[in-house]
Amino acid sequence: MTEQTTIQHPYILKVALDVPLDGVFDYRSDTPLQAGQRVLVPFGPRKQVGIVVGTASESDIAPARLKSIIRHFDQEPALDAEFFSLLKFCADYYQYPYGQALLAALPARLRQTEPAQARQQFCYWLNAVGLAAGLDMLPARQVVQRRIFSALLEHGRLREADLAELSPGWRKGLAALSELGWIEQEQVYAGLRSILHASSVQPELNAEQSYAVQSVLQQRNEFRPWLLHGITGSGKTEVYMCLLQAILAGNEDQALVLVPEINLTPQLEARFRSRLPEYSLVTLHSNLSESERLQNWRLAQTGAARIVIGTRLSVFAPMPRLKCIIVDEEHDTSYKQQDSMRYHARDVALVRAQRRNIPIVLGSATPALETWHNAQVGRYGLLSLQQRAVSQSQLPQVKCVDVSKVQMQDGLSLPLVKALKTRLERGEQSLLFINRRGYAPVLLCNACHWIAPCMRCSSRLVVHLRQGCLRCHHCGHEQKIVRQCPSCGNPDLHPTGHGTQRLEEVLVKLLPEARILRVDRDSTRRKNALDHMLAAVHAGEVDILIGTQMLAKGHDFPNLTLVGVLDTDSALFSPDFRATERLFAQLMQVAGRAGRADKAGEVLIQTTLPEHHLFNALRGQDYAAYASGILQEREIAQFPPYEFLALVRAEANDYAPVQGFLQFAAEAAREMGSAALVYDPVRPQMERLKGMERGQLLMQASSRQVLQQLLRQLTPQMRAHPLSNRVRWNVDVDPQEF
Ligand code: ADP
Ligand code: ZN
Ligand code: ZN
């Protein structure tokens, strides 16, 4: 019987599917398929796209119940072994179903049930007739046609992307030239090289930059992580480009450059294209259309793209000849995926580099403390760029405005308003920086600055007015709200934290003549909105910019001489131990915006803690001093990077099942006899979100291995628990936010 089946259906496939279940599924196929191919299979009542992860000669499933695949998608390059092993690693490490991890790493087009054709690219040139013709044969008003014609004359062949750069109306213009019988075309696969960009002149590297490039090159054939530490403008990007120049020259190798924000890719892309015009370059990010994304992904996969610049997800892009990874702004929180598989792209990049035995460069002005720590203990090589590459006026002056001592109006202090007025009179620009994160109220004494601390953790208690209690979000400790300051006796304690919602209105009232522009995620949601806004700032059409962190990075406004930072206390007082680290990174970046050209800049920071060591470090732009201080705190408090954390989050319409589920998880974890510390389940800062009651369970260990061992046992038990279907839950390994 079995034998007969085997003869009839000799191929049994192990197929990974996008389903929240562990393991892979057996299907049979009439044709032999290899691992890495996509198939369409029946799953329950539906059809699903799956990936063949392997083949087998027999199956545990009874032959009569073994289903056949519906079809396979041929004419597609198969996914390579590295793709599988990297995602297997991630699925295990981040406690996420393997099949879902695999499918989520594909471009959306490859998850659809139709065959996916990458869009075909063509290139064009003038044939003999066209060459014999002249520009004067085209009427002067046919601007686009004339432009295309001239460019073709000059460059010979042009790709669609080049033409698109010439003019948005290029398709019509080209069609008109084609109709004249002047144009030939050919499909291109690897001709992604842009020939329009004149290669920009490479500045001579300074000693620190050369040392950085040489150091990496000396160990270019082995796994070696490097931290490239230097403030904005210190020349990190030049180092990346020189490094890639050396690594890619004379071979067919590939390099991956990870960037945190879509908004930053166009700038970086333009610089790389003009400096490295001989290498085909593609980008991978969510602003691309699905077909562009698939096409670029394919070009990475086939090796045709030599440089890939991409955001988080591109860390999984198959690149058969990958020889170097760069992670720019490696500390950026957007590298951490906050749903589905909660991977950290920088960490995955490190794993990938290690497995491929290649160098990886992590660049930042304010490295993540984990990274800094690794560089300090010698696990990563440290490459410092101390000077600004281009001569720069003095560092901006950083001043704190003690908001407990000055007059305030809706979150704006008098000195700040005065400074804004001065800039307005001088025709200079100002930036008001809003730190949106961490609005959790704490109990603060305005007289002596005492903040209600947790007795069992080095964190602050969070005020829960509704329940009239103070609670620790790390260990669950709870106590009643005290009315009197235990430190100085002040009988008038208040929860702190004010909104910034009315800021724009208030500014309009205070400075009616000022032209104000608000730049945040909401106002820049539309495509190109940010570009238009930035152009307006450059054109001097804006006096005061109100912005969140997205403005802090990468944009250079020469006429901007004042940065006002409105709300630092919510971060300084946040129960999230990483909040001050993020604040410091933001302030370093935002301070770098002030007075970049020949004008001296000023940074005014509103705070109730003007003496905080964070501000001292900021004054000297001294990351190292700041980091060593905060690392000591972390070591004493036993927080990362000295300990490793995992968080189980759960939510449901009411709290009972959440509590039951987390309680079960906590008890199960404790019974495993692991060296890991298992806390009690607690309510997070946002107890209720979108109508869901939430809870979380923190686990902590001194090594990743201990934590991983615990999770490996615990996750299947949680999946099997009856309450697991009544709550929405996930495991967050190395969580970045609490
Ligand atoms: P970062 O990436 O650290 O912000 P960049 O590499 O963008 O710094 O450098 C900042 C500016 O200085 C750029 O305009 C760059 O072209 C220029 N630059 C960098 N290195 C040098 C150098 N060695 N000589 C002259 N200009 C340089
Ligand atoms: Zn007090
Ligand atoms: Zn506590």
Image: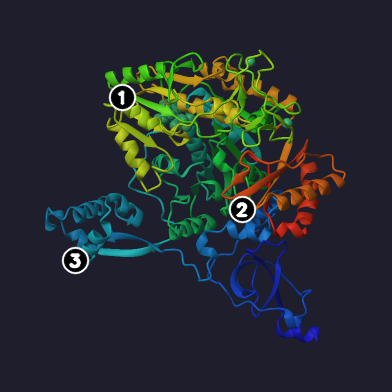
Q: Nearer the viewer, residue 679 or 40?
A: 679
**CB atoms at circles 1 and 2 under 8 Å apart?**
no
Is residue 467 something one can see in this rendering? yes
Q: Say what secondary structure mark 2 lies in.
A: loop
User: For numbered disc 1, what is the local secondary structure?
Assistant: loop
State the CA–CA distance, disc 3 to disc 2.
54 Å
Task: Label 3, secondary structure: give it.
Answer: loop
Relative height, residue 621 to residue 191 (above, below): above
Q: Residues within 10 Å of mark 3 (few under 14, many from 20)?
A: few
Q: Is residue 325 above or below residue 6?
A: above
Q: Amino acid at mark 3?
A: Leu
Say few, some or many: other residues with alpha carbon within 10 Å of mark 1 (under 14 / 14 to 19 / 20 or more). Answer: some
Q: CA distance from mark 1 to mark 3?
A: 60 Å
Tell me the residue that label 3 is attached to. 180
Image mark for residue 340: 2
Horizontal and vertical percent position of residue 487:
68, 15
Q: Tell us which disc is closer to us: 1 or 2.
A: 1
User: Which residue type carries mark 2?
Assistant: Ser
Residue at 76% x, 74% y is: 57
Q: Which residue appears at 63% of the width and 59% of the height?
A: 100
